[in-house]
Amino acid sequence: MSAGDLLAILQGAVVTVTLSLAGILIGLPIGLALAILRWADVPVVARVVAVYVSILRATPLVTLLLLLFFALPNIGIAIGPISAAILALVMNTAAFNCEVWRASLMNFPKDQYEAAQSVGMNAPLRFRRIVLPQIVRVSLPGLVNEMSLLIKVTPVLAVVGVVDITRAAVRIGAETYDPLPPFLVAIALYAPIVFLLVSLQRWIERRQLKALAA
Amino acid sequence: MIHDFGIVWSERSLLLSGLGNTTILSGLSAVAALLVGFGLTPALMSKQRWFAWIARGFVDGMRCVPFLLFAYIVYYGLPSLGLRLDNWTSGLLALTIYNAAYMAEILRGAWASQPREPIEAGVAFGFSSLSLFRRIVVPPLLLAAGPVIGNQVIQIVKDSAFLTIIALPELTHAAASIQSRHYVPFAAFITAVVLYWGLCLVIEAGVTTVDRMAASRR
Amino acid sequence: MRDVTKVLDVVGISKNFGDLEVLRDISFQVQKGETVCVLGPSGSGKSTLLRCVNWLERPDAGQIYLNGREIGITTGGVVMGDRELSKIRTHIGMVFQHFALWPHLTVLQNLMEAPVQVQKRPKAEVRDEALALLAKVGLSDKRDVFPAKLSGGQKQRVGIARALAMKPDLLLFDEPTSALDPELVGEVLVVMRELAREGMTMVIVTHEMGFAREAATRVLFLDRGRVVETGSPEQFFSNPETDRARQFIQRYAGDRPPAAGVK
């Protein structure tokens, strides 16, 4: 493996990180919005969200990606590989995030909410000042877990031509007839990122447990 | 659009065979992963530090690596070490080993929250280790861990779709093949999505049944 | 507009939960400065009645007037939206059985949150008043502490201070001491008695008979969703008119000794 090969894999890493970040950052608030729609039980919309989440959680990312990339142009929406990749990531992760946010919303202590009502806070205030700060805290481990899962599905973006870490490694392996070294480099790039996220999640969980016990 | 679905319908045998392959692949590796997991969990909790350390290394390692990369390593990488496997064997092997790590972690968590007394009672009543394991330890463990294991099985189904990239003829591969030959992407992939959803609902129904059994025994 | 020395006017309130009739045609009034204690066996609907006053529960029938203005239904006869309801609620304070403090805010922040965010009062002014309230309930030293670190009695005193911070016309107490260990009940009752003495208009759902006897200006006895008896505490406790009231007093007023601190 030459220095040029290594560079190619690192370029793939940039793509992996950028697309992951895009998926994570966009997926977080959308997931929250979906969860709120279900929690507030908005008529019709809440049911639609429930079905959407159920389907998206059951659909493999590769299938979703192929669907978006090939089917959207077919019905008149032009979409390139990067956009399709981000869209697929966002649709997927938003569905999982929705469930994490929803769990914390469902378990939110009712009397704190009523106390906010009783002092005359209207719905936006109640949500912004009382509910949100706390559900962020509670949802954090689940959301960080979902982030690590997202990074681990990014290799699939190669099916639409996106050159991420894995695709770069495969290509170099095919060119040099020596597949193992680039794969090992790929692992060396993925593992620290995922490990960091997993450790972050464990640290958050431990801190919250300690705060409860205090 | 209706015409497109008509084309998909005409290719239904390909789709069904893809669905069948997905189901078989997922089912086999789920069972195998669970069995291997059962072997790993005691290693994880072993008193011998080096043993537990290796097991922990494996489990954490699998959880830090993307599945597709691991599948590639098994399929493309092993041959350079002298082990050449076809895509079916690679796929099954990769799915099993990868998810065994997750199953081990799930079982470890479930074991930690199991009460000890019923097992002590089993020992006191003279159950030998193997039958103790089979009849006293495992059933409540599986009942308790049902939902989480169910989730992991769904994850296995979704991971199996990755294997389309190494040309394994599972469901996504079938849909992609239909789409590339007939240019009916929407119909083909939507059908695949609906079939995955259906498979997932079946698994969730299974989990609910297990959960109901667990609840009536609580 | 109805007579405005009446702070609270409850007319014909009924409430069902499914098939269960929890409140049946309840009417009563509270004048300014009164302390009304609502007593009754478990399941009599006391808490539900209280929660109907500020529309945390929606009554199925009847009207509720605060200072002459109807709560929950607009002048047009339509159910009030969240914003209008919230505005009215700023005039009614509530103290909860399980304190309901906001755990992510310190004690002082709990007190300041609503006056600043809802009433839009200037922060400095709110802060000074909040500190004064904390001093009043005896918790000045806890102002920067998070609720999780407080005892039950301390939490409830903060809960009372938080309700007072909004300068409400009416204070509702939903079994304020029922979740407290016996030794901690007294410190909360002391605060409540002081408020009664100062002329705060209060409606208190409670099991503390001793407190009701000492501090109430009027007692409302509820049984199975109906107001069975009402009157001054002296009259109710020493000479109840109905059998149900008599049974209740014998069962509850006899066995529990008055809480520490209440004399």
Image (spheres, coloured by chain):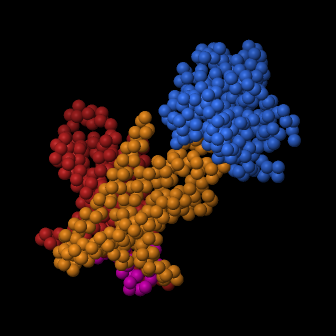
Residue at the image position 42 percent from the left and 47 percent from the top: B212
Residue at the image position 64 percent from the left and 47 percent from the top: C117
Residue B190 higher or lower than A121, as above or below: below
* C112 horizontally vs C10: left or right: left
* Residue B204 percent location from the top left of the image: 42, 57
* Residue B4 percent location from the top left of the image: 48, 83
Residue at the image position 40 percent from the left and 66 percent from the top: A20
**Residue B189, magenta (yes or no):** yes
Residue C218 visible in image:
yes
Between residues B195 and A40, which one lies in front from this camera angle?
Answer: A40
Q: Indicate the chain coloured orange by its letter.
A: A
Q: In terms of secondary structure, what is the magenta stretch mainly? A: helix
* C174 horizontally vs B117: left or right: right
Q: Indicate the chain coloured blue by its letter.
A: C
* C111 horizontally vs C5: left or right: left
Q: In which quarter of the image is residue B195?
A: bottom left
Residue at the image position 22 percent from the left and 71 percent from the top: A182
Between residues B89 and C198, which one lies in front from this camera angle?
Answer: C198
* Residue B145 percent location from the top left of the image: 35, 48
Residue B108 higher or lower than B205, as above or below: above
Name the residue furthest bottom: B182
Q: Residues in magenta?
A: B167-191
Residue C19 visible in image:
no
**Residue C138, magenta (yes or no):** no
Residue A184 higher or lower than C109, as above or below: below
Q: In which quarter of the image is residue A188?
A: bottom left
Q: How many marks?
A: 0
Name the residue furthest front: C124
Q: In which quarter of the image is residue A194?
A: bottom left
Q: Indicate the chain coloured red by its letter.
A: B
